[in-house]
Image: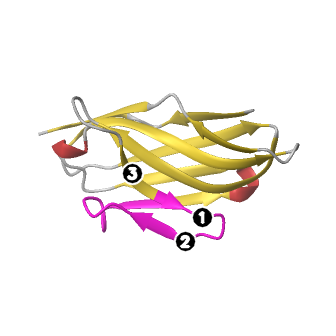
Amino acid sequence: QVQLVESGGGLVQAGGSLRLSCAASGSIFRINAMAWYRQAPGKQRELVAAITRGGTTNYADSVKGRFTISRDNAKNTVYLQMNSLKPEDTAVYYCNSEALTHSLEAIGSWGQGTQVIVSL
């Protein structure tokens, strides 16, 4: 099993910044891709940013140039630096990982989510 714990959400004014963290723990042999998704009220969950183990990144068009995803493989942790936040970034942000356990089982996992609220 793999557990993901997010932190760093909160309330911020438009134009401000937040940094989200997500730490993975459990029977982890290797974590491959890690990603951040978000879900706003009444909307579907959407991909915000993803990063491979080697550091290749992918971003939603709506956050390009404002958000940066990074990871620390030694700590099994992924980060999301969010700058120039807008009210439309308000959502619950979820961490996702694709991991290989010590028993060589491929597992996809989700965190519990962290709320980000951007006010005018």
Element under disc 2? loop
Q: CA distance from mark 2 to mark 3?
A: 15 Å
Along the polypeptide, which appears first: circle 2 or circle 3? 3
Please state the extent of the stretch shown in magenta in the rendering: 50-69
Q: CA distance from mark 2 to mark 1?
A: 5 Å
Give the left or right position of residue 23, taking residue 85 as reference: right
Q: Residues within 10 Å of mark 2 (few under 14, many from 20)?
A: few
Labelled pair 2, 3 in contact (Cβ < 8 Å)? no
**Residue at (29% x, 38% y) in the render:** 44
- How many numbered callouts? 3
| Residue 44 in magenta stretch | no
Element under disc 1? loop
Q: CA distance from mark 3 to mark 1?
A: 14 Å
Residue of label 3: 47
Q: Quadrant of the image for the N terminus? A: top right
* Amino acid, disc 1: Thr
Answer above or below: position of 64 versus 41.
below
Element under disc 3? strand
Give the left or right position of residue 58, taking residue 109 as reference: left
Answer above or below: position of 49 versus 96.
below
**Residue at (47% x, 44% y) in the render:** 20
Residue 23 falls in which quadrant of the image?
top right
Q: Residue 9: where, in percent of width, then height? A: 40, 35
| Residue 63 in magenta stretch | yes
Q: How is the image coloured?
A: secondary structure
Q: Quadrant of the image for the C terminus? A: top left
Residue of label 1: 52
